[in-house]
Image: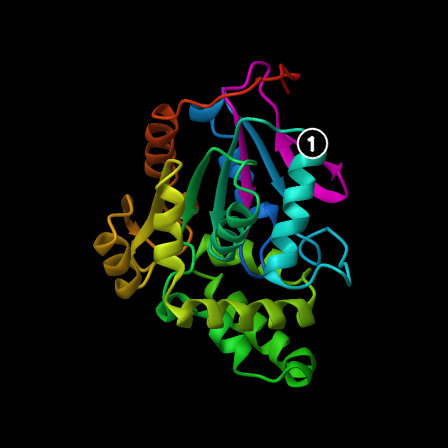
């Protein structure tokens, strides 16, 4: 695995010599590509190339005044994919990343050929940390809320490896950006359209929702996805980070989904790390 600035965004990547395709991993709120470090290196998916950028204002990517909202983040990521000239793309977004991937797909449907939504926001019950951040006004959150929320994450990290890794990334993100994105996530989740929007993507391309259970996606979210016949797989027992909580089971489920794909376009040979 390599770490470097690629097309303007700090990126963790592992390139296969003869890739089956390119998996673009999109992190969640307050997160960074660090959360995907194990997944990027999994032997089970060694035939795939992985690309995991830190979105602007998160992780090691610098904040960009012109790229603050989720729609702008999606547009920036679309340009990043185009600059890399990726052609056989599978979008895999975790939490907020699932929403960013949805927005990207709706505006740039030709850039990707499949969508893996990992614990992405669907209903208000999925807004755990985002709802807590959104409850503050911007100035109060930057002044005191960011640190208070970080302390809650740090405390949970004493018993939970996923939260421990989360706290490491959280400390590096832009507090004002996290507050803005939190409010957007709450609003989109309350609108109640995210499940239907994922269903609509699935009408033209393969999609799957991978959920942690029983401490991951809200029951309402799962019910909405089931009602709309969006393919769902639940990993048990797991919380919000199933790729950390149930690594082997997650890799198996992801591998099964990828094996069903018939990607088109050139697969450019790359170096084997």
Image: 138 above or below 202:
below
In screen coordinates, is 173 left or right of 264? right
Q: Residue at x 33, y 52 (%)?
A: 212
Between 248 and 55, the one lying in front of the other is 55
Q: Quadrant of the C terminus?
A: top right
Q: Residues within 10 Å of mark 1 (few under 14, many from 20)?
A: few
Between 29 and 105, the one lying in front of the other is 105
Magenta highlight range: 1-27
Check disc 1 and report its element: helix, strand or loop.
helix
In screen coordinates, is 202 left or right of 45? left
Q: Is residue 182 visible?
A: yes
Q: Residue at x 50, y 40 (%)?
A: 91
Q: Picture coordinates of residue 31 (x, y %)?
A: 58, 56
> Would residue 7 be counted in the magenta stretch?
yes
Q: Is residue 54 visible?
A: no
> Would residue 224 be counted in the magenta stretch?
no
Q: Residue at x 65, y 85 (%)?
A: 140
Which color scheme did the rendering employ for the protein?
rainbow
Based on the displayed image, in which of its 4 quarters is residue 58 positioned? bottom right
In screen coordinates, is 32 left or right of 153? right
In screen coordinates, is 220 left or right of 110? left
Between 254 and 112, the one lying in front of the other is 112
Based on the displayed image, in which of its 4 quarters is residue 176 positioned? bottom right
For the image, the number of numbered tags is 1
Q: Picture coordinates of residue 134 (x, y %)?
A: 54, 77
Q: Residue at x 40, y 54 (%)?
A: 197
Which residue in the protein does label 1 denote? Answer: 84
Image: 252 above or below 109:
above
Q: Quadrant of the N terminus?
A: top right
């Amino acid at each position: 695995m390599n770490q470097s600035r690629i097309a303007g965004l700090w990126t963790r990547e592992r390139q296969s010599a003869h890739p089956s395709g390119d998996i673009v991993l999109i992190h969640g709120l307050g997160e960074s590509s660090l959360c995907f470090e194990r997944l990027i290196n999994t032997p089970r998916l060694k035939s795939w190339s992985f690309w995991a950028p830190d979105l602007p204002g998160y992780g090691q990517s610098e904040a960009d005044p012109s790229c603050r909202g989720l729609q702008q983040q999606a547009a920036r990521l679309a340009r990043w994919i185009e600059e890399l000239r990726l052609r056989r793309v599978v979008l895999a977004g975790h939490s907020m990343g699932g929403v960013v991937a949805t927005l990207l797909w709706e505006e740039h449907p030709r850039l990707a050929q499949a969508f893996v939504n990992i614990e992405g926001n669907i209903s208000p019950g999925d807004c755990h940390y985002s709802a807590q951040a959104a409850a503050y006004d911007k100035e109060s959150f930057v002044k005191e809320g960011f640190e208070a929320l970080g302390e809650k994450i740090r405390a949970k990290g004493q018993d939970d490896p996923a939260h421990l890794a989360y706290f490491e990334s959280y400390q590096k993100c832009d507090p004002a950006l996290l507050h803005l994105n939190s409010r957007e996530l709450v609003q989109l989740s309350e609108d109640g359209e995210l499940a239907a929007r994922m269903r609509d993507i699935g009408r033209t391309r393969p999609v799957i929702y991978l959920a942690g259970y029983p401490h991951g996606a809200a029951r309402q979210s799962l019910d909405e996805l089931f009602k709309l016949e969006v393919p769902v797989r639940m990993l048990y027992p797991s919380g919000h980070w199933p790729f950390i909580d149930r690594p082997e089971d997650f890799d198996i489920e992801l591998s099964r989904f990828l094996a069903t794909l018939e990607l088109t376009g050139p697969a450019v040979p790359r170096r084997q790390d």
